[in-house]
Amino acid sequence: MPRTQIEREFLRLFGNHPAVRSRAPGRVNIIGEHTDYNGGYVLPMAVDRYVEVACSADAEARIRVVSSAMGECTIGFARLEEHRGRGWMSYIAGVIHGLLARKIRIPGAQLLIESDLPVGAGLSSSAAMEVAVALALLQLADVVLERREVAQICLEAEHDFAGVPCGIMDQYAVLFGGGGNAMFLDCASQEFEKVPSIPPEFRLVLLDSGQSRQLAASGYRRRREECAEALEYLSQAGIRASSLSEVTPLALFSQQEKMPGRLFFRALHVIGENRRTIRAAAALRDGNMIALGRLMYRSHQSLAARYEVSTKELDRLVRWARNADGILGARLTGAGFGGYTVNLVKGSAVDEIVERSNTGSVVIGSGETASAWRI
Ligand code: GLA
């Protein structure tokens, strides 16, 4: 059987053939930003860029990892803690920790990771790596685990090992997205509905603001704290809700005069973004890209003015998009604080937009579901 590139590379590096392969897509969030950790709605889509893994078992209680993009490391099962907070390795150590903690007997292994997902573009390359590694190790151990449990393991890896207090969107999108659909996910119940993805006459184009997400980690954490403070304030005022997404606009506005302005606007963003996300899912069902584009612009406005996670460069790119022929909607994507904008573009205008934007760009289509298989 002809070997694929990653299998040949595996043989070259480790001197034996891989036994298992896996592949997990990145994701783009069409709309529903900073709602996942507030028990709200999100609308992500798996993209046609992937993290791929090839692996084989060996006798030692450790995983030897080679990543073409990141480098090499060895993660001993007895010394997982050493990898806490250590960039890309912490994601893998966290996944191994989650599997072992569930008494899943994974063997020692050699693992090669390749990826065509750009890092820092807001396509969730870290969630894709966690999922690809988890699925590969499970396949190697011959264990079938519910995907919701895999999502939980990957989320714990982010929180406890990488130190990123993210919500559940990325792991769900990577594990359950794909197959030509977008995913309308209720992060409170973790129930989701598959809705049609962007029609083929349109594309999503990411444009680089040129700013790396330097402040993203601290800014993201701060926003989470502010949301918790807003919820606490509302509950002190007698408004009962287990998350900001359960607060009605009426209840929130009843506190507008008394509540600290910053907290009021954070909550207002969450409530408004949930409504926009519900409407965006309807727009996708109807194939109404004009409506979807408008909602994306409004989402950006709210993220910039009320949630304050935009930057001058991101705002400039969105303003540019408003005046460019062929773009129906644009907004910052992911956590914000730099990174890329996501633009809804007519297929016929993509080349021109990419050229005229005069910045780094990634044109994305909808991707396949994450999977693992024996070779
Ligand atoms: C990051 C996190 C997600 C989500 C977004 C904001 O991408 O990983 O869980 O909170 O920010 O919507």
Image (tube, rainbow, N blue to C red):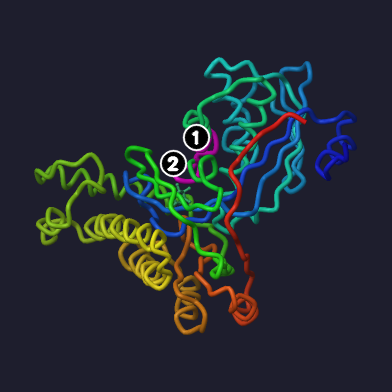
> Who's the residue at 47% across and 32% down the image?
148
> Who's the residue at 44% across and 41% down the image?
168
> Who's the residue at 50% across and 75% down the image?
317
Say which element carries label 1. Answer: helix
> Where in the figure is residue 133, as x and y percent of width and height?
65, 34
User: Mark 1 belongs to which amino acid?
Assistant: Ala
Q: Residues within 10 Å of mark 1 (few under 14, many from 20)?
A: many
> Where in the figure is residue 181, as x and y percent of width and height?
50, 52
- The foreground one among 19 and 109 is 19
Q: Are marks 1 and 2 in contact (CB under 8 Å)?
A: yes
Q: Classify mark 2 as within 8 Å of ligand 1 or not, answering yes or no.
A: yes
| Separation (CA) of disc 1 from disc 2 | 8 Å
Going by the image, does 63 lie left or right of 325?
right
The quarter of the picture where the N terminus appears is top right
User: Mark 2 belongs to which amino acid?
Assistant: Ile
> Where in the figure is residue 298, as x and y percent of width and height?
35, 69
Is 170 included in the stretch rendered in magenta? Answer: yes
In this figure, which residue is indicated by the disc labeled 1? 151
Going by the image, does 50 lie left or right of 67?
left
Is 168 included in the stretch rendered in magenta? Answer: yes
Range shown magenta: 157-171
Say which element carries label 2. Answer: loop
In this figure, which residue is indicated by the disc labeled 2? 168
Q: Residues within 10 Å of mark 2 (few under 14, many from 20)?
A: many
- The foreground one among 130 and 280 is 280
